[in-house]
Image (tube, rainbow, N blue to C red):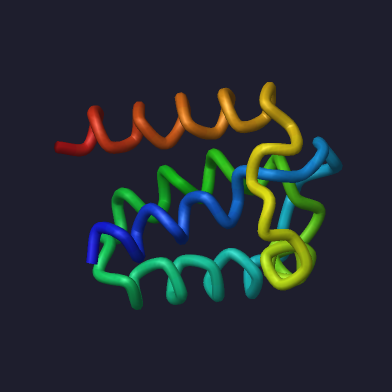
Amino acid sequence: MKNKFLLFIIIFIMTSCVKKDWSQTEEENFLYDCMQVNVTELICDCIFSCIEPEFETYKIALQFLGEKMNFREDESMNLRMEQCVEKCKRDLK
């Protein structure tokens, strides 16, 4: 299950910065999907705060996953996302 969690996180690591503010429905869909891989709601909320600024919409984030399998294209964003997600895991233990 940890592998699924890590894959879920990696999905959102690669893309360029775009505007934020997903709709309420998109946020709810993300949180639902996140919790379906046995991640707590608190961690999913924290992860949401990490990924939302990186993608214009949840749909774009999901499309990105379907199109990209090379997760190392933007190292600076990778670092930001990894640090944010690690902070979530540390703070919410």
| Badge count | 0
Seen from the viewer's position, the closer of residues 83 and 46 is 83
In the picture, residue 79 is in which quadrant? top right
Direction front: furthest residue: 70
Residue 13: percent from left, percent from top: 61, 44
Q: Quadrant of the N terminus?
A: bottom left
Q: Quadrant of residue 2?
A: bottom left
Which quarter of the figure is the C terminus placed in? top left
Residue 67, compared with residue 44, is above or below; it is: below
Q: Is residue 76 above or below residue 69?
A: above
Judged from this view, the residue extending furthest toward the left is 93
Residue occupying image coordinates x 28% and y 62%: 39
For image coordinates 71% across by 61% down, the residue present is 61
Q: On the picture, is 51 further left or further right than 76?
A: left
Task: Tell me if 50 is positioned left or right of 89 in this view.
Answer: right
Estimate the x, y position of residue 19 in percent, counting from the top left: 84, 42
Q: Say which residue appears at 24% left-offset and 29% top-offset.
A: 91
Q: Position of residue 49 (x, y in %)?
A: 53, 42
Residue visible at 22% across and 37% down? Answer: 92
